[in-house]
Each structure stands twice: as structure tokens, then as C-alpha cells.
Image (cartoon, coloured by chain):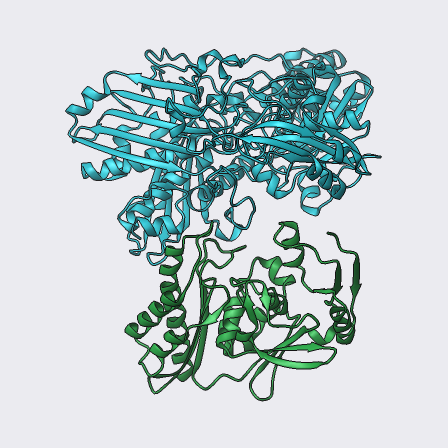
Chain colours: A green, B cyan
Amino acid sequence: MSVQTFTTASTVEEAIAAVAAGARPVAGGTDLVVGARTGKSTMPESVVAIHRVAELHGVESLADGGLRLGALASHAEIAASGDVRKRFTALSDASAIVGSHATRAQGTVGGNLMNASPAMETGGPLVVLGATATLRSPSGTRSVAVEDLWTGPGKTSAAADELLVGVEIPAPAAGTGSAYLRLEYRRQMEIAVVGASAAVAVADGVVTEARVAMTALSATIRRIPEAEATLIGSDGGSAAIDAAGAAVAAASTPISDVRGSADYRRAMAAVIAGRAIETALSRAREENA
Amino acid sequence: MATVEEPRTFIRPDGKEKVTGTGRYTADLVLAGELVAKFRYADHTHARITRIDTTKARALPGVLAVVTHEDVPDVLYGGMVQDRRLFAKDTVRFEGDVVAGVAATTAEIAEQAAALIEVDYEPLPVVTDFEAALADDSTLVHPTWESYEGDEALGRHDNTLGYSTIVKGDADAALATADVVVKGRYFTDPVQGVPIEPRAVIAQWQGDKLTVWTSTQVPYAARAGVATTLQIPESNVRVIVPLLGGGFGAKCDFHFEGHVAALAKAARRPVKLVFSRREEFFAVGHRREGMVIEFESGARSDGTLVARKARLVLDKGAYCGEGGFFAQMAAMHALGPYELENVHIESSLVYSNNQPSSSIRAPTAPQVCWALEQHMDELATALGMDPVDLRRKTLIETGSVTATGQVLERIAMKETLEKAVEMIGYGQELPDDEAIGVAVGWWPCFASKSGAYVKLNPDGSGTIITGAQENGTGSVMAMPTYVAAELGMQPEDFSMLYQDTDAAPYDMGSCGSQTTFNSGRAVIAAAVDLRDQLLDAAAEKLEASRDDLELTGGSILVMGSPDKSVTIAELAGEGTFHGKSEDVVPDGPEAPAEGCVGRLGLESFHAPQLIAHAVRVRVDRGTGVARVLEVAAAHDCGKILNKIGADGQVYGGVVMGIGQALSEGTQLDAEGRHRNAHLTDYKLVTASDAPKIDVAWIETDTPGAGPKGSKGVGEPPCVPTAGAVANAIAKVIGARVHKLPMTPERVWEAGA
């Protein structure tokens, strides 16, 4: 199959109309074309390029302390944002290590989310930061929690006529720290074999809020309530961290493939989750200091 | 023309076009009317072909040719054993066997047509466990192996394509008397060359004359392969190599030039083949071999090595190609650069239904060295000796006699070791997750015939006509530098006519670290001949004795009479000057090699290059992830003629060695099919992972060396790196990793 129709949208309305008519949106093109070339997927018959839609760009700090990311915000742009680095650190961690310099310059957060790979970098951080995705179709706009966006590898709950237009992250609670960490075999061009995200709030030496998500360890990126429960109310010491790491490992359903065996991945789930939580906790404590 | 003679950096003349994207590689060339070639590969890794029907493919509009074994001469080819056909006839033996080729107007049509070819098979048992392939009752990959032409010395038998031993004294008896005996078994995954340019071939016929543009490291071998398989004279075949985007050995040997030429002939149109990255992995019969390596060594308590036994099994894959010498080469690396009283090494090169292996940068050496150098460190531990001290005690030195009886007249093995440990600061205090590992290795030079011409143009510039290849190895820097030095001119004064078999005499190609050694020798000889012609002409013109003349700064001067001179440009404008090499291939050293079998000439190492690497490594004990932080590389490669190029070879070789050590490995499924034939999961080391690399050259005068006392440079830098990394990892984690690459999971399993 080769592309029969290729159009370029200049407004969101044009983009949505094209998507509703069956076109696949392409922004950075780092998944669509590469996937087709390697045989992972086929090129769609109809493609709409959305990279010129100005409204879909941008990283914007909101008056209420939240953050709005246009679907077309590139990983490089997000990683370069001082506000993201300071207050939404897990996302900054993730955006800074997606693929290579070229991937980060070209790839977008919207594309990353909608590609729905369980190994994507930005998904876990957005989940633990409580982000919502904004989907638009000709019939309207709706918001969906990012953690409810994925239904399986490569699958989302978005309807066929919906386009992801942006992502909103609420203002973090006072004393919040967050982190994303992945197991990596090399420093560039890497794909997470195991990844973990944590966002924690600490008050008076006690963990008051905790969200922990795992990456590349199940069919979709998801939160691990058992790990969160071991942390909330604890002092965030090594016993609590170890217990949380063990909970992530227990909840994981890893596969064996060329990147690693299920046993190794499960063991690394505990290690990487523990380190992500530890880093998030230390960042939270710095916030309080 | 430059006339100022002063030492300065000569920048490679092909650099700018490569870096700015204006350089043209084979795939960039476009011929009028060219068609696109696609192959139909084997649908099984071992099966008998019962029917091939190309009717539907031929009927597809846009298809101009479909070629199978029926359309080409029934010829078996292969460098050391003739065991392969261009297009599979009765049997397919690995995933990348080509059953048919298609030439069509577009890639999509060619692909569709290839899929429309109907092939029926009777599947045969698949031989993927190459160690088990040695068993008497194993399925034979080539049941008719006895009928194949091949090098007699290989000692072929059943699945064993090559068998070689090195025997000295009585190793078993000596082991019984040793104070300490250590045993180890090691396993290595196959590794790929991974040139960044996937290969491309374009073939065009004009009458009986064929021109092939191809991304090969060995155009003369490619020409010979086309001539043999298509049964035409070599004089009808011209092979041209446009810019070559790397090879690392994977573009040695004859590969697809014959297939594309056959398609072009059938289609009566030029045909272009450009490989995808996936094809560059699985379809090329050319990768670094997997091995099983067993060592047993005995030492006296003072460290003297009384005996070494080794058993090596190498996976040759489905076909021989040029790599038939691997059993003996691996045996020589099992010997290593050590003084040994008693030796018994047995090495088998075995057919399997895996992808064929052939020369990748220093074939067999990095794997065997990785195992041996770990084994030596294990021996040091058992002896309670520092591993560097054990090597100080046991390494070869000037005057040593190897186990095959070669007398080493002048080498600097121990000096490289001392230099490497000095550069890295061996013995320094380190954090407890870091350690320094050391490994040593050796590699021979390969003397081969080579020829060259150097001609002067009327404006006084020159052209070097050479068979030397530019595979990233720096010959475009080296050759003009060598010639300019002979003629008192500047490297910039010369262009090169190269990578064209119709232009220059035979050359081995970019392989065997031989470009300076052989092509360099030829180019210098041609320059000397030209120099003689210039001196004769100048003597006449200046009415001076030849002996009083000096070539410098682009002129010929009469020594002591600065006003009497003539420029080379002036002479060139008046006469015809072309130097030609008279090639004298240096003789290799003798080695009686008594008691050794499978002698292919590698029982002695011609002008051996000696290498010591010391590496500082950090291991994450939680995950098993190892990072190489620093490498000190000390090499005895004789006199260094082109330091920028030589240093570059070490940087690249070390990084390749780190990839082999930590992340590069082809994973095969139960039927011998690639599972990671792409750059996402075949993990090359990236620039971000590359450590600090310090290089030192120990310049010795080695008998039998190449021009001006040089030896090879290109292959040794990747030989001991993995062994050094392994020894550092073992120091950190207190356990040995017995599988290569030492992936995080394997390090973790070993007990990080």
C-alpha cells in the first residue's frame, strides 16, 4: 500500500476534517514512516500533514500553575523548557532522552502519545503528573485522562474522527517532585526496556501523595496502585522504596524478546522503579527545603 | 601548485563532499532507463527446492526480467571452496539465499513480482547449533561437499569446512605437572559489519562489455566473481566503486554483482540494486562468526605457562566465500602473543544453516582474544598474581620463538603493555563500581601483489593511479602523502584515479590492513620511478650530474648552486613522465609448524602487529549496565606514516570493539533467522557512548615490514578491546561473563 492522498492542513479545522474523512495525521513522522519502512505497520492510504497548524504548537505555562502542551510540541522544545524542568521534572527527564537529537527535534508529544507504544518515554511522566489529553472531532471536544488514553499496544480510546490537539498538566501540589528513569543500554537511539515514573509530594517528612507508573512492562503504560499505597503515609525511606519497587515488579507482565528476558525485566522493574521513586523523593525534599 | 615545503596537516580530499552531502555513492548514481532489482529470498533456512514458477511474476506489467538459476551458467563459486551458486538451484541453505531476482520499472512492482514467484520446497532439518554440527550423525549442510573444488589444506570433512591444529610438545603431560590449572568455556554471538551505507550495485551492458558500479571493498575480487559466474573474460568486466560508505569487512568478497549483471543482461537495461537496512543484515553472506571456545592452561607458581589446550568451534554458516582460513586464524589467536612450553589447539570451522560468516575487521581475533584474555586473568587470580604481572612474565618479546616455530626478530609486545598501563594509570584508587581491565593481542600483515602508476600532468600536478580502496581507511590521505614525499611536492598536488579495475593493476582491496603495506608500497615504487625520470630530465636540462640534484618544494635544484633549478611543472610541460611500480612482495617469515595441520600460511604471522588495551569501566551493579569510561590503546604497528589516519583507525576500532564487548550481537531464532535485523535492536555504540581514547604508537623496525618500516593498522584496534572490558567487568562484579556480547542482562546474570 502506498499513500494515495497527501494533504497539508493549515488550521485545526482542516486537520480535523481530514482526519474525520479517514486521513492519518502525520506531524514529526518519526513513527509513521519508520514503522511502514520496517514492516511494523502499513502506510495509510490517506495522510494529512498537521505540522503547519500553528494552534497545535507550543509549551505554555498556565495562570493556574498548570501546563499546556500543544500536540505538536517537540521533545526538544519540552526538554528545553525551564518551567517543565523545574515543576514537571519527570516529563523533562523523558523528553530529553527520546531517541536521538534528530528524533527529539522532529518527534512530538502528541505523536508519542497517540502511537501508544508501551515503551514510549513521555507517557509515564504524563500519567503520574495527572495529565489530560484533549481530543477534538467535528462533533466537539473532550478531555480524557492520559492514563485512560491507551487500550493496548498501538491502540487508543480515541475515536476514528478524533485528533489529539493538546495535553494539560494540572499544577502540582506543593512539595512535589517527579522523575522518569529508564533502563538503557546506550545513551542515544535507545528504547526503554524497562521504565518507571514517579511523582510524590512530601510534607513534614511524610509522603502525602504518590503516583507511580511503569513503562514497557505491560501492554500499556499504567499506574501501580500497590506501589503508591506503600509510599503514601510512609517516610519515603529505603524500606518504603524497596516495597514500592517490589510492588511494581509484582504488577508487571513483561515479555521476553530480543531486548531482554521477562525475568530480567521483572527484576529491573524493581530496580528502576525504586530509583525513579528515590529521585522523585529527593526532588520533593529539595522543593520543601 | 603548492611550493612551500613544510610539515602540515593534509586533510582528506574526499572529506568535504562526504560531510556536505555532495558526495555521490553508488545508490546516488542514476543511469538512463535503469530498472530496480529485488530478490526473492529463501522461504526456509534449509530446504530442497522442488519447483520454481516465475510465470505470474513475468506477466506483471512493468517487470522486464526475472532470473533464476536456469538463466545463468551452472557455476559453483566461492573463494576457498566453490560451494555456492548465484541463484539457488536445488537447495536453499540460509535465510538470505537468493532464489530469484526481478528487474522492474519501480521498486514496488519489483517487490510485488518477487512475491509472485512460486517456489515449492521440501523442508530439511535445520542445522543451527554449529557445535552439534560436528557430530557424525548431524544433517549435512552440503551432502555433496566432496565434489566441491576447494583448498586441499582445509581438511574438509562432512560439516567441517576447515580444521586446523597447533601442536607443540605434550600439553596433557605438562598440565599434569602444573602447579595451577584453569579451565574455561566461552560463547560468542555473531556480529555484523554494519556499514552505514547499505550496499548498492548497478550493472550496465554495452554489447559484451559490462560495467558494474558497486559498493565493494574488493573491486578486483568482484570482477573475478562476475567473470567466473557469468563465464565471461575479466577484460569484459569493469568494476567501479563510487564513494564507499564504510564496509568494516562486510563489503569484502564477491556478493551481488553477478546477480545484478545477470538481471541487466536479461532486461537489456541498466539495473540497480539498493539494499534495505534489513537486507544489509540478513542477506549478506558476510558477518563475524559465532564461536564456542574452550581453554585449559597450566602454569608453574611463578607464572610460567607450561601448557595451553584449546578447542575452538567456529560457525561458518551456509557457505565458504573467502573466509575458509578462519580455523587456522582462530587457532593462532588462541595461541596469542605468549611464550608457551606446550600447546595443543584444535580449531574447527563448521557449516551450518546460519548466515555465512566471512572477514569482518580482524576476523576471529576479537572473540578468541576476549576469551583468552579472560582466561589469562582467571589464571592470574588462581596464581595469586596481578594480571599485568602475569603478562609481563609470559608475553613474547624480541627473540621469542612461537609455538609454531616462528622466530620473532624484533617486536614491541611488552612495550605496548607497559605503555597502555602507564597511560591509564593502572593501580590507581577507583570507586568500587569501577575497575581497569587489560588485554593484549596480535595480528599479522598480509603481503600481496599490488601495482600503481603515477603520472605528471602538463601543469605539474600529478595523478596517482592505484588499486587502493578508500573504505574510510584513509588511503586518499595516505597515497598522495607518500608520493609527495618522494617527489618533494605537496599531497594537494595529486589527484587519485582509483576504485576502477580498468585503470589500475590488481590490488587486494581494502582488507587485511593491507593498503599501506601493499598499495602503499606500489605507489611509492611508482613515485620513485617517476623521480628517476624527473632527475634524468633535470640533469640534462641543468647540465648537472644527477647525484647533485635535489627534489624539493616542487623544484629540482642543483645542490650548492641555488640559482640552477627547474620546476617540476616546467619539466612536466615539456615531457612525458609516468612512473610505474615494480612490485617486490616481501617474503613472509618461516615457521616449521611441526605437528600442525590445516596449514594455510597463517602458521607464521608476517610482521606481526602487537596491541595492548587498558580500559576503565563502570558497572551498575543493580542493572548490569557497563560503561567504558576510558581506553588507553598502545600499538606496535611499525613506523606510522600517516598519524591522523592511524589515530582515526584506533578511535574507530576501539569503539567497534566496545560494541562487540557490550551490545552488538545478532540473535537468531530456532531456524537460524535474524531476530534483530535493524539498528534499533542491533545496538551499535553511538558517539555519546564513546569514551576518551588515548593512543600511543610504539614504532619498531620490524623485519619484513611494509614501506618505510610500516605495518598494518586498520584491524588490530578492535582486537583486544572486548577482552580488556571483560576483565574490568569481572574485577567489579567478582564474576566472569562467559558470553559475548556482555549485555547488561548477561552481566546481571553473572552476578552483578
Q: Position of residue A216 (x, y in %)?
A: 48, 62
Q: Quadrant of residue B260?
A: top right
Q: Quadrant of residue B198?
A: top right
Foreground residue, A215 or A98? A215
Kindly identify the residue that appears in the image at 30 percent across and 28 percent down: B395
Q: Quadrant of residue B543?
A: top right
The vertical placement of A23 against B709, above or below, is below
Is B62 on the left-hand or right-hand side of B594?
A: right
Quadrant assignment for the N terminus of chain B: top right
Is B139 on the left-hand or right-hand side of B453?
A: left
The vertical placement of A112 against B102, above or below, is below
Q: Position of residue B301 (x, y in %)?
A: 16, 31
Whether residue B332 can be seen here = no
Whether residue A66 can be seen here = yes
Q: Position of residue B355 (x, y in %)?
A: 52, 33
Q: Residue furthest right?
A: B32
The vertical placement of A148 against B482, above or below, is below
Is B546 on the left-hand or right-hand side of B340?
A: right
Q: Position of residue B91 (x, y in %)?
A: 57, 26
Kindly identify the residue that appears in the image at 54 percent across and 75 percent down: A148
Q: How many marks?
A: 0
Foreground residue, B683 or A214? A214
Kindly identify the residue that appears in the image at 59 percent across and 26 percent down: B253
Foreground residue, B96 or B513? B96
